Amino acid sequence: MIMRRGFAFLALAILLTPLTALAGSYPEKSITIVCPYSAGGGGDTSTRMIAKLAGDIMGVKINVENKTGGGATIGIGVVSKAKPDGYTIGFVSTSPITIRTHMMKAPYHPLKDLSYIGQFVASSQPLVVLKDSPHKTLADLIAYAKANPGKLRWSTSVQRGGPHVAVEAMFKQEGAKATFIPFKGGSKVLAALLGGTIDAAMISEGNKATL
């Protein structure tokens, strides 16, 4: 099972000065990108990659700060409360600004508090198992979960995010029951899969490459 997830930069507030007005002097100092995902995960890796490329092009240092927790809402909340001068921007996937704001109280309004600069990557989210797993196909996973309710353990990087909701919906539709094990970030999910703590994981392509 593969889910597509888009990533975008977002900047604080509708009050953000238009880029055309900044063209003559911006940037005059270093820029901070807030990444709401844990170090070593797919979101963090993508953020650091784009920070390096953008910094080289713009001739300015771009720092990455990881502000994790709350299903990525804490980091986005930091961005929403920063000074709207273009020097604090954020990185976010679609879930914290679409699904999660309907499932929990977030410290920001996705339309009123943030301005969106643009999407820079679309990432696949495959549901994976280890090579020596007895489950070779998605049908195998579903069959096991149906025959052994609650025994199949799985996880994804962000609780109540798009991948989490999608997989739970799939199990429900198939009449299967699995146990979701929460972890703080994609790197910890990957470690749990490699260590046998969980049986399957929906992870980013960046993390999948390490398997």
Image: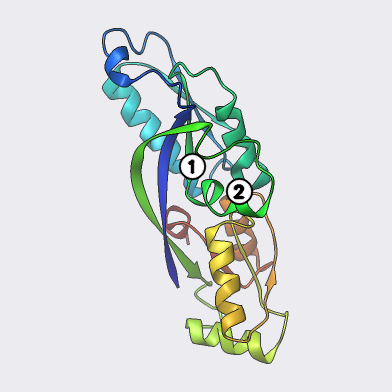
Q: Residue furthest bottom?
A: 147
Please state which of residues 168 and 13 is positioned toward the viewer in this rendering.
13
Q: How is the image coloured?
A: rainbow
Q: Which of labels 2 and 1 is toward the front?
A: 2
Q: Residue 115: horizontal and vertical position, in percent?
A: 44, 32
Please state which of residues 163 and 51 is positioned toward the viewer in this rendering.
163
Q: Earlier in the sequence, mark 2 or mark 1?
A: 1
Kind of element beneath mark 1: strand
Tell me the crowding category of disc 2: few under 14, some 14 to 19, or many 20 or more residues within 10 angstroms, Cα based: some
Please state which of residues 68 and 119 is positioned toward the viewer in this rendering.
119
Look at 66% across and 49% down and name the residue there: 184
Look at 55% across and 77% down and name the residue there: 170
Please state which of residues 197 and 185 is positioned toward the viewer in this rendering.
185
Position of 177 with respect to 137 (left or right) is right
207 lies above or below 3: above
User: Residue 92 bears which disc, if any?
Assistant: 1
The quadrant where residue 87 appears: top left
Look at 67% across and 92% down and name the residue there: 147
Q: Which residue is mark 2?
A: 101
- Placement of the N terminus among the 4 image quadrants: bottom left
Asked whether the viewer can see residue 156, the reply is yes
Cα distance, mark 2 to mark 1? 13 Å
Tell me the crowding category of disc 1: few under 14, some 14 to 19, or many 20 or more residues within 10 angstroms, Cα based: many
Asked whether the viewer can see residue 134, the reply is no
The amino acid type, in three-letter code, at marker 1 is Val
Kind of element beneath mark 2: helix
85 lies above or below 127: above
198 lies above or below 88: below
User: Residue 70 bears which disc, if any?
Assistant: none
Q: Residue 146: horizontal and vertical position, in percent?
A: 65, 89
The amino acid type, in three-letter code, at marker 2 is Thr
